[in-house]
Amino acid sequence: MIVVLIAATALADQLTKAAALLNLPLGQPVAVMPGFNLRLGFNEGASFGMLSGVMAGKPLLMAALTGALTLVFAVMAFRARHPFERAGFALVVGGALGNIVDRLRQGAVTDFLDLFWQDWHWPTFNVADIAITLGAVCILAASLRSRRRKEPVLDRR
């Protein structure tokens, strides 16, 4: 199940990025609904544009760093006992692999999802970023649930 979820996540990410690259004009918004546009862009930093100035022009370094973290998360996925935790790590690994492919293929990650309110825009993102965020939520949920089970029962006499 872990390998299937990793592969499905990376594939969904790459297919949606390919569609964006083929169909969207660079940097020009395509309105979908109020508060949501499709806007093709490229990110040389981490998720949501973090560290883009520091990592600009260093796609192989960014891919190597991301790859090392991805390997750690993959090992954690196979060692995890809770299904939410396994799924969470698999989503993180699949999303990271999708972004690593972009860095190796084109030197930057393809982003195209643009959420906004009036003049404020969330950093443009992609399906890999959604998977990584959802994976982190699953890991956190599994962690909180297992913590509640391990807490000692207090005697309220």
Image (cartoon, grey):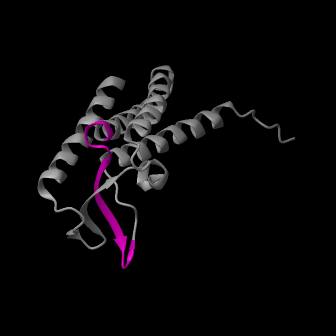
- Magenta region, residue range: 103-120
State the residue at coordinates (64%, 35%).
147
Residue furthest bottom as drawn: 118
Q: Which quarter shows the C terminus?
A: top right
Q: Is 16 one of the magenta-colored residues? A: no
Q: Quadrant of residue 101?
A: top left
Q: Is residue 91 left or right of residue 112?
A: right
Count of marks overlaid on the render: 0
Relative to 141, does residue 4 appear above or below in the rendering?
A: above
Q: Is 115 positioned to the left or the right of 137 in the image?
A: left
Q: Position of residue 21 (x, y in %)?
A: 17, 51
For this orientation, the residue located farthest to the front is 57
Q: Using the image, determine if residue 1 lies above or below residue 28.
A: above
At x 25%, y 63%, the residue is 39
Q: Give percent across and percent down for residue 153.
A: 75, 34
Looking at the image, residue 51 sits to the left or right of residue 110; the answer is right
Give the residue furthest to the right.
Answer: 157
Residue 95 location, x and y as percent?
Answer: 35, 39
Residue 153 shows up from this direction? yes
On whether residue 105 falls in the magenta region, the answer is: yes
Q: As rendered, which of 1 and 131 lies closer to the eye?
A: 131
Quadrant hosting residue 2: top left
The answer to whether one can see residue 1 in this image is: no
Q: Position of residue 84 (x, y in %)?
A: 45, 34
For the N terminus, which image quadrant? Answer: top left
